[in-house]
Image (cartoon, rainbow, N blue to C red):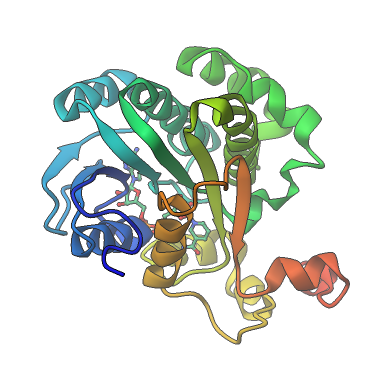
């Protein structure tokens, strides 16, 4: 069977295509025959069809890029992100509000059966327990309202911008995936565990080397960017046509162990 994943001749948009998992995703999509449009605040080295310089915290820049790309778009891969070392509000705007703005701008341009995949994180695994806190943000009508909500809710965002942004992504994917299911448009998120990308030193800077030395790794190592990229490409493939509104974990068994008692969270957060 040729073109098993059905990306040949399709048009894909990849944010964060200049580095890490986004660059790995763009590379795979190009190999699979897609026309790839990279969106990043930095130029893409990957040989994409077009590299659009976009700051995802600026809605005018997002709108200009969407207009330049035009339709139809067959798949959107929301891979860009800011790490835990960036200011909380910036993290919320880039990781969640800017990507939501991009997604809503792209939805009218999507072809039948199109897929939208976000990179979230195991840091967003608590979104169901925190739904009452995070859904009001997810239900804000637009980027400016999301920014105002973040500024008004330091108890959710303050010091917690990264996990809050990832919980918001998972909640948005569930809410919007459910709403759009009858249309055939699919939204899902990939929740990676620690992955060796250029972002990893920022996580170590904010969490400490001990945190990552102690982080349980059932498969014995961090992920490679291409392993996460393949999970994303599989998740968003038109072949995966019945999967929508879900959070998929590519964490080498971490949450499986955590949720069934095999992994003790106290190992991650030892007492001072
Ligand atoms: N590396 C990990 O361990 C890990 C684990 C879980 C989730 N994640 C998530 O994976 C995604 C990809 O991160 P990565 O690890 O490949 O890191 P990376 O730093 O290699 O890539 C992040 C990309 O986002 C781009 N970006 C940052 N701010 C931007 C902005 N304002 N506008 C447009 N582009 C912007 C960067 O230029 C970069 O190309 C992120 O959403 C991150 O939160 C990473």
Q: Residue at x 60, y 24 (%)?
A: 179
Residue farthest bottom in this picture: 220
> In the depicted view, which residue is nearer to us: 241 or 57?
241
Name the quadrant containing residue 68. top left
Q: Quadrant of the N terminus?
A: bottom left
Residue 166 lies, in percent from the top left, at 59, 44
Q: Residue at x 58, y 36 (%)?
A: 173
In the picture, measured across the screen, residue 103 lies left or right of residue 145, that is: left
In the picture, measured across the screen, residue 44 lies left or right of residue 101, that is: left
| Above or below, 178 relative to 226 | above
Residue farthest right in this picture: 261
Name the quadrant containing residue 140. top right
| Above or below, 30 relative to 81 | below
Residue 30 lies, in percent from the top left, at 19, 59
Residue 85 lies, in percent from the top left, at 50, 50
Q: Can residue 271 be seen here?
A: no
Residue 235 lies, in percent from the top left, at 48, 55
Q: Quadrant of the C terminus?
A: bottom right
Name the quadrant containing residue 149. top right
Q: Residue at x 57, y 54 (%)?
A: 121
In the picture, measured across the screen, residue 198 lies left or right of residue 173, that is: left
Q: Residue at x 82, y 42 (%)?
A: 129
| Above or below, 98 relative to 113 | above
> In the depicted view, which residue is nearer to us: 1 or 51?
1
Tally of numbered discs? 0
Q: Can residue 32 be seen here?
A: yes
């Amino acid at each position: 069977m040729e073109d098993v994943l059905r990306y040949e001749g399709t048009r894909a948009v990849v944010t964060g295509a200049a580095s890490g998992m986004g660059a790995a995703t763009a590379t795979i999509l190009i190999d699979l025959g897609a026309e790839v449009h990279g969106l990043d605040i930095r130029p893409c080295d990957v040989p994409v069809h077009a590299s659009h310089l976009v700051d995802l915290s600026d809605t005018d820049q997002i709108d200009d890029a969407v207009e330049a790309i035009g339709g139809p778009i067959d798949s959107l891969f929301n891979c860009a992100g800011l790490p835990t070392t960036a200011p909380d509000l910036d993290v919320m705007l880039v990781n969640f509000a800017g990507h939501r703005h991009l997604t809503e701008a792209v939805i009218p341009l999507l072809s039948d059966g199109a897929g939208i995949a976000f990179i979230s994180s195991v840091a967003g695994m608590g979104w169901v327990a925190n739904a009452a806190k995070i859904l009001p943000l997810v239900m804000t009508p637009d980027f400016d309202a999301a920014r105002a909500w973040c500024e008004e809710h330091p108890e959710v965002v303050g010091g917690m911008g990264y996990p809050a942004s990832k919980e918001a992504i998972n909640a948005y994917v569930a809410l919007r995936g459910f709403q759009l299911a009858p249309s055939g448009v699919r939204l899902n998120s990939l929740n990676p565990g620690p992955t060796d990308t250029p972002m990893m030193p920022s996580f170590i800077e904010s969490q400490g080397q001990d945190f990552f030395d102690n982080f349980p790794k059932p498969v014995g190592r961090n992920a490679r960017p291409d392993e996460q990229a393949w999970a994303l490409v599989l998740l968003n493939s038109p072949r995966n046509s019945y999967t929508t509104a879900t959070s998929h974990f590519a964490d080498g068994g971490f949450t499986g162990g955590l949720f069934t008692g095999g992994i003790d969270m106290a190992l991650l957060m030892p007492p001072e």
